[in-house]
Image: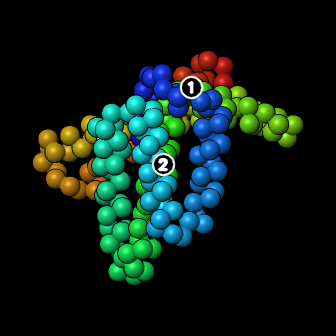
């Protein structure tokens, strides 16, 4: 769910990356103070309107929602039993709105633009020994690693089923960790070959 940029010419595509990140950060800071189902519903409607404004197909929105259901449905049931449906709606609604908003930012903003904003924000930290370009590189590598690990997990799962190991956590975790470490070593060697030190 990271780095899903889709080309477009909508108003949201033209908003600067810094403004979008600032809006996302501000929304995240305000979200713990939401207590009302009406405010939560309004927030969800605004986020969905953002998808419409960005001219995102409905299937893209559904792809974003599908993985959320695995976590949000049990969470909603638990909160309904413990705290009532209104509190459950607020908690689940706020979390869904935040995730969808974060995805909307990645759908309408190039990853390189987001990284450039982080590098600029980290600029003043140069005085205390932080290299902003290195922070940007680290962030870009982390973003790139997500789809690589997902792909590795998919291949490990396919190999696991082909060997008839079923749903064994050990048969999945060990090759996934070993494969991830090998990729990290290869990436480290590539960086060292290009002049980056430890």
Task: Quadrant for residue 167, please give it.
Answer: bottom left
Question: Which residue in the rendered view is the most extreme toward the right?
Answer: 127
Residue under the point 66% across and 19% down? 195
Question: Which residue in the rendered view is the most extreme toward the bottom?
Answer: 82
Gap between marks 1 and 2, in whole Å? 18 Å
Residue under the point 53% across and 28% down? 11
Establish if 20 lies above or below 37. Answer: above
State the residue position of label 2: 46
Residue under the point 56% across and 31% down? 140
Q: Position of residue 155 (x, y in %)?
A: 26, 37
- Label pair 1/2, CB-CB below 8 angstroms: no
Q: Residues within 10 Å of mark 2 (few under 14, many from 20)?
A: some
User: On the rendered image, what quadrant is the N terminus found in?
Assistant: top left
Residue under the point 59% across and 19% down? 193
Disc 1 on helix, strand or loop?
Answer: helix
Q: Position of residue 112 (x, y in %)?
A: 57, 26
State the residue position of label 1: 14
Q: Nearer the viewer, residue 185 or 57?
A: 57
Q: Position of residue 2 (x, y in %)?
A: 46, 38
Mark 1 or mark 2, which has the lower sequence index?
Answer: 1
Mark number displayed over residue 164: none
Establish if 92 lies above or below 163. Answer: below
Residue 164 in view here: yes
> How many numbered marks, from 0 up?
2
Q: Residues within 10 Å of mark 1 (few under 14, many from 20)?
A: few
User: On the rendered image, what quadrant is the C terminus found in?
Assistant: top right
Give the number of the mark in front: 1 or 2. 2
Establish if 66 lies above or below 83. Answer: above
Disc 2 on helix, strand or loop?
Answer: helix
Q: Position of residue 180 (x, y in %)?
A: 42, 39
């Amino acid at each position: 769910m990271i780095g899903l940029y889709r080309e477009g010419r909508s108003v949201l595509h033209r908003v600067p990356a810094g403004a979008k990140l600032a809006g996302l950060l501000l929304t995240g800071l305000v979200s713990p103070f939401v207590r009302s189902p009406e405010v939560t519903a309004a927030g969800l409607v605004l986020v969905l309107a953002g998808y419409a404004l960005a001219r995102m197909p409905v299937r893209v929105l559904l792809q974003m929602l599908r993985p959320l259901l695995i976590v949000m449905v049990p969470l909603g049931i638990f909160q309904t039993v413990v705290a009532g449906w209104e509190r459950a709606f607020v908690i689940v609604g706020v979390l869904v709105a935040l995730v969808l908003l974060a995805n909307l930012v990645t759908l309408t903003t190039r990853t390189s633009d987001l990284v450039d904003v982080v590098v600029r924000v980290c600029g003043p930290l140069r005085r205390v020994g932080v290299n902003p370009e290195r922070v940007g590189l680290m962030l870009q590598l982390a973003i790139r690693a997500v789809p690589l690990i997902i792909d590795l997990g998919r291949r490990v799962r396919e190999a696991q089923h082909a060997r008839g190991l079923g749903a064994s956590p050990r048969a999945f975790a060990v090759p996934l960790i070993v494969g991830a470490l090998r990729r990290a070593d290869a990436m480290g060697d590539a960086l060292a070959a290009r002049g980056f030190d430890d």
